Image: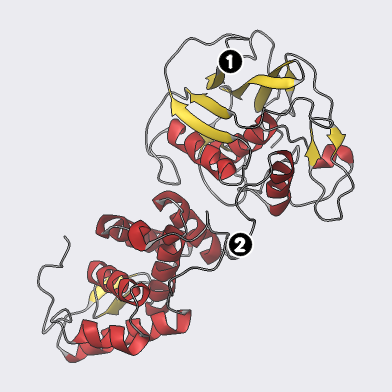
Amino acid sequence: MRARALGVLTAVAGVVLGAVAAPSAYVSLNQGTYGRWPAGSTISMSLQLTGEGALIDGRTSWNAVAADAVSSWNYWLGSVDLIGRVENRSRFRGNGVNDVFFADDAYGDAFGTTVAIALHLVRAGQTTEADVLFNRAYSWNSYRGPHRRGLYDLRRVALHELGHVLLLDHPDDHGQSVDSVMHSNTDDVDDLRLDDIQGVRALYPHGNPVQPPASSFTLPTRAEAVDFRHTMETRSRNNGAPTATTFVDIDGTAVWNAEYIRYRVNRCTDVTARDRVFAQIEGRGIQPVCGAPASISLFPSFGDNDRFRAALETEYRDVLKSTAREYHVGVEYGAWLMREYVWLRITGLTHPQAITRLTTSGFVPAPWPPALPGH
């Protein structure tokens, strides 16, 4: 998948940034301060990607996908802010608005095989406008994982083009070999990489640290989450609960529900947290969190937790082709139990204390749970 490097209304030179040790070899479209967005400015992207409907990753609109890409970059910026605003307005070159939209051509110039393009306007050595145009001739969706032939992932292409908006260039066009969403051929890279982050932090310094500080609250270990879930299964069986069918094994239920919550309390949205859990499940490694750990106010709602557990069921059934099995803790009740267990751990209880609380408070079925609290 090739995304065209950059179209310029006023030319911007592309050079390597300083002497940087491998593998960090990000490349900037500016030399010194030329072209850089002014410090203290807010770069507002006018999101005008019309169309709604369920996408592969669960999002329901193109603008929501683009907004997520905007926020992914913005977390790492220091001297400027990058924000997205959903708008419906006229578009033309030099209107002073950073327009983002599907187009049939690049303001009259044929796209050719170009998937998307970023167009800059530079005045007095500073960027004053940057538009992002997506080629309407291609088939678009939003998904994680390897590039799907003939189906372009709007989110990763948006990340790439927004990198150009921020004045990053293609490392591979300058002889660099690094892991980066900014390569001219982004194919299987579906999120920001360390090289991309270091690049924008060099251009717009004093943003959030690359490694967020340790959380002020404690999350259960994987072994503890699994032990809790097995304990609940045993007690439910002994209390005479009927079996329920699920494609997710006990260990998977415990580990991935806890991982989903970990991403959420570390500032990931519902959809992003789900994506990153599924990336781990599918063997793409532990994914970075979205920001510095926050207060427990970011703990996912019952509804979000239930939707994640339903999506996990689908992932195991349709992607992993898991075999159906019978357990004595049903899908919804199991999701509720795991959420309550992690909540108790975050709020200060030890592993044994949390188990005791949940097994002596009338929550464990005897023989079957009443209406779940919070629903």
Q: Give the vertical position of 292 relative to 362 (above or below).
A: above
Q: Find disc 1 in the rendering and name its residue.
A: 104
Pointer 1 local density, CA inside 10 Å: few below 14, some 14–19, many at least 20: some
Q: Quadrant of residue 167?
A: top right
Q: Is residue 226 visible?
A: yes
Q: Quadrant of the C terminus?
A: bottom left
Measured as percent of width and height from the top left, residue 49 is found at 47, 25
The residue drawn where x is 37% and y is 57% is 298
Compared across the picture, whether 331 is left or right of 313 comes to left
Callout 1 amino acid:
Asp
Callout 2 amino acid:
Arg
Q: Find disc 2 in the rendering and name its residue.
A: 284
Q: Earlier in the sequence, mark 1 or mark 2?
A: 1
Q: Nearer the viewer, residue 259 or 205?
A: 205
The residue drawn where x is 62% and y is 61% is 211
Compared across the picture, whether 132 is left or right of 141 comes to right
Q: Secondary structure at mark 1?
A: loop
Q: Nearer the viewer, residue 285 or 322?
A: 285
